[in-house]
Amino acid sequence: MKELAAGIAAGLAALAASYGNGHVISKTLEGMARQPEVSKDLRSTMFIGVGLIEAVPILAIAISFVILFS
């Protein structure tokens, strides 16, 4: 049962992170297309957002290892 819980936690976190990254990147590209003069600011903000979003599956993998090996 622990294996199933760990797999579900990791899988859902990866799915949510991929959706979030896609949404952030698409909105950033939309903003760059509308206002090219602020594309540098948007790009740096996007990288910060993507980095924060990517922290979620890393934490989920750590939690799934705790579930798996406890």
Image (cartoon, grey):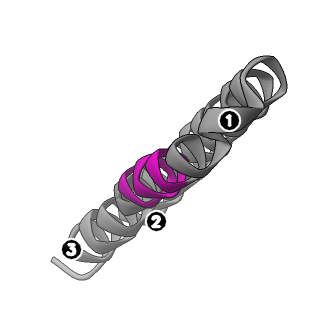
Which residue is the extreme one toward the bottom?
69
Which three-letter amino acid code belongs to the residue tagged 1?
Answer: Glu
Magenta highlight: main SS? helix
Q: Residue at image x 46%, y 65%?
A: 3
* Distance from the alpha carbon under mark 3 to that under mark 2: 11 Å
Q: Residue at image x 43%, y 46%?
A: 49
Tell which of 13 and 6 is nearer to you. 13
What element does badge 3 sit on?
A: helix
Tell which of 18 and 25 is nearer to you. 25
Counting from the top left corner in percent of width and height, residue 29 is at: 78, 33
Q: Is residue 38 above or below residue 14?
A: above
Query: Residue 3 got which mark?
Result: 2
Number of labels in the image equals 3
Asked if one can make out residue 50 in the rendered structure from this viewpoint, the answer is: yes
Q: Dot 3 corresponds to which residue? A: 66
How crowded is the residue under tag 2: few (<14 C-alpha within 10 Å), some, or many (20+)? few
- Quadrant containing the N terminus in the rendered view: bottom left
What element does badge 2 sit on?
A: helix
Residue 58 as seen in the image, left or right of residue 16:
left
Q: Is residue 11 above or below residue 16?
A: below
Q: Dot 1 corresponds to which residue? A: 37
Between disc 3 and disc 2, whose residue precedes?
A: 2
Which residue is the extreme one toward the front?
37
- Quadrant containing the C terminus in the rendered view: bottom left
Q: Residue at image x 51%, y 52%?
A: 50
Asked if one can make out residue 8 in the rendered structure from this viewpoint, the answer is: no
